[in-house]
Image (cartoon, rainbow, N blue to C red):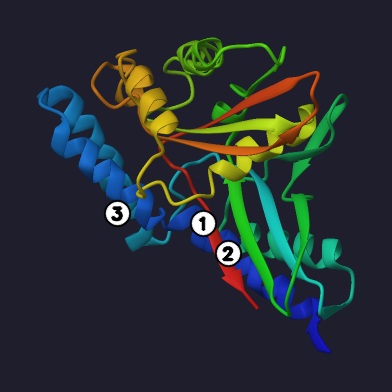
Amino acid sequence: MKIIYGKLISSTVKDLCLKANIELRNDVLSVLKQACGRESNPKHRNILKVILDNARIAKKERLAICQDTGLPCVFVELGQDLKINGDLNKAINKGVEEGYKSGSFRNSIIKNPLGRGKSGFAPAIIHVDLVKGRKLKITVLPKGFGCENKSQLKMFNPTVSWVQISEFIVNAVKTAGPDACPPYVVGVGIGGTADYACLLAKKALLRNIDSKNSKLEESLLNEINKLNIGPMGLGGKATALAVKIEEYPTHIAGLPVAVNISCHATRSATATL
């Protein structure tokens, strides 16, 4: 049986925290450049150029893309035919702390959500899926709370029309307005339970956004971009860069729909051991 030691997991998570916060994903850079090319208004185009320059400088100078380095969400695909030597959660959180300290990132995590108090670098939010095989896949998604605060969930009746669902998703972005640093990547989770729909919406942000959209995703993207919120809320064609939908079977009596919005700095990094 393949054995993966906690020390390797910690060092891998440390590297992923650094990469995710410093190097903007290639697919995000690609759609930002495409949006910049489509924008005819000089003011709006310049904002997108500034966003791209910020990403370039962050990578070159090894600095955080954004001062809000978020609450790290760690997605784990754990192969059922391997063994973890050590405590998986402890190893991940150790890697998060080491990565955030090494990068001089902001310590934004408070352990007492009501009492607040002193902030730190961990714990992360950890999601583990058991999968076939002998590999361990780890993805770190640092989620800033300017955009996380704009999340929405609605428990629809099963008789709802797609028009009503679409209106809810578009209105979620309209409600966010300029506050979450557009242009956005919009993750949508449909189905499951209330909690699982929210997880699906966040997982949708991990998908390659430069790939071809489905008809539903393309329709939503077009409607959202008609809002004219634009880059950093100053108007323009690019209110969103992409809409990604994840679905799961649900109960006959309901239809959960969740929206998780990410800012223009949609950051994640992945490694497979």
59 or 82, which lies in front?
82
Quadrant of residue 237 within the rendered picture: top left
Indicate the position of residue 236 as horizontal and vertical percent values: 23, 20
Residue at mark 1: 20
> Contact (CB < 8 A) between labels 2 and 1?
yes
Distance of label 3 from label 2 (alpha carbons): 18 Å
Q: Can residue 199 be seen in this view?
A: yes
The Cα–Cα distance between marks 2 and 1, rounded to whole angstroms, is: 6 Å
Q: Name the residue under label 3.
A: 56
| Residue shown at the point (26%, 16%) measured from the top left | 235
Task: Name the secondary structure under disc 1.
Answer: helix
Query: Is 210 placed left or right of 22 in the picture?
Result: left
Query: For numbered disc 3, what is the local secondary structure?
Result: helix
Tag 1: residue type? Answer: Ala
Q: Is residue 67 left or right of residue 254?
A: left
Mark 3 / mark 1, whichever is N-terminal: 1
* Total labels drawn: 3
Measured from the top left, where is residue 137 in percent x and y? 65, 68
The residue at which mark 2 appears reads as 16
On the image, the x and y values in percent for residue 199 come to 70, 39
Alpha carbon distance from label 3 to label 1: 14 Å
Q: Of 4 and 180, which appears nearest the observer?
A: 4
